Amino acid sequence: MKNIFLVCLLFLFFGCSDDTKKASNPIEVKEEVAVTKPTYTTPTFTTNGMLYTKGNGLVKVQPYKMLRASGNVKDILLENNILYAGTDAGSVDIFDLKTDTLIDTIKIPPFHDNIYNKEVTSTIYSLDKVGDKIVLLTSYQGVQKRLYIYENKKLTEIKEINPNLMIIKVRLIDKDKVLLGLLSNELLLYDVSKKRQLYRVKLSESSFGDMSLSTDKQEVVVGCESGIVYLVDIQSGTLKSIIQGANKDKSYKVDIKQGLVLSAGQDSIGGLYNLKTNTFKTLEANFLIYAGILSADGTKAAYAFNEENEIIVVDTQEAKKAYLLSGQKSTLNAILFRENNSLISASDDEFIMLWKLD
């Protein structure tokens, strides 16, 4: 009896053998390594003048072509002369801009409204495309939203995404990863193929305004209710920089190209930040600036300009001759540069305007 007791004590003192440990704990536990995330910067941006003044001259431009969508246009996307227009008529209208004709339509199924007990047409609020894959953000019950992937002529709902997330904007990072901008001013990166969330980060207590990806899709700028713009690393969700100074109220639209960051504000101020010099220029509009965009090379910026829904196109380097685009009939939702001297705009109606400068 004493020998048995002694063996038990020795076993407890020295522990079990390696083989016994492996059998009882088959999962290998690696030593945790502390990961140091880079801290964000808050550079002091100083003003560097105006993007446009009344003394610089203004050339008035009318649209050379008008396309008609199936409903009010909420978002537009351009790729290789093919224009995709998300509407409130439950469809994405696809136009060939070489012939200015409608060539295809993606139909989104209606949903049953539980409050009014009837079928309701879906609205496409946001869309993006990588390769042959298109992601669509659509309306659902009340403030809920649905996400769809359209590929190979097949529409598939991403059912793993909670419809109560209050998604405002969606962008594809690659064929598998989709970035969601939430009303709570959070970014959520989701892997569609693996059906899992990669990260969810909150930038501030302000509500979300807009987001835009850098050309290489390594960074995203996010505008919010405070007028502050956040620069975030897309792969890690790490906040890289806080950009502020131009706007004191909500950023409706933001953009980033060639080291420049554009913001379009509720305070009727268009901001243009230079990330290399930590300076900013401003444009004073006559109304809330609901839309704005930079050209691909960063030499031009376009902003919604006044209550008549006109668009002003300015030079980003110096205040000189500007263009005033007249003809849009409703509140602007989106502006795109097709080339440096041509633009596309869409508003809260079915008319899409095509413009040429000079």
Image: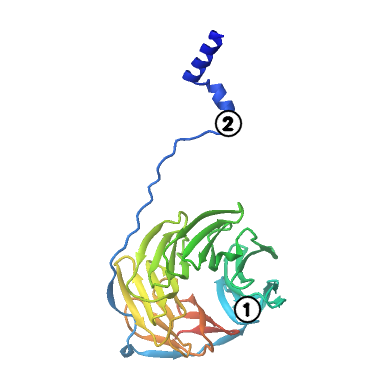
The mark closer to the camera, 1 or 2, is 2
Task: Characterize the local packing of mark 1: few (<14), some (14-19) or many (20 or more) Cα atoms within 10 angstroms.
Answer: many
Residue at figure coordinates x 50%, y 80% from the top left = 343
Which mark identifies residue 276? none
Q: Amino acid at mark 2?
A: Pro
Mark 1 vs 2, N-terminal side: 2
Residues 206 and 155: in front is 206
Disc 1 designates what residue?
88
- What SS does tag 1 mark? loop
Q: Quadrant of the N terminus?
A: top right
Q: Quadrant of the C terminus?
A: bottom left
Residue at figure coordinates x 35%, y 55% from the top left = 39
Horizontal and vertical percent position of residue 223: 43, 70
Which mark identifies residue 26? 2
Residue at figure coordinates x 51%, y 65% from the top left = 181
Q: Quadrant of residue 300?
A: bottom left
State left or right for residue 262 relative to residue 49: right
Residues 265 and 95: in front is 265
Marks 1 & 2, CB-CB < 8 Å contact: no
- What SS does tag 2 mark? loop
Horizontal and vertical percent position of residue 220: 45, 63
Residue that extends furthest to the front in the rendered view of this protein: 1
Q: Is residue 271 above or below residue 218?
A: below
Task: Characterize the local packing of mark 2: few (<14), some (14-19) or many (20 or more) Cα atoms within 10 angstroms.
Answer: few
Q: Is residue 44 above or below residue 116?
A: above
Q: Amino acid at mark 1?
A: Asp
Horizontal and vertical percent position of residue 346: 54, 81
Horizontal and vertical percent position of residue 212: 47, 68
Residues 351 and 357: in front is 351
Residue at mark 1 to residue at mark 2: CA–CA distance: 54 Å
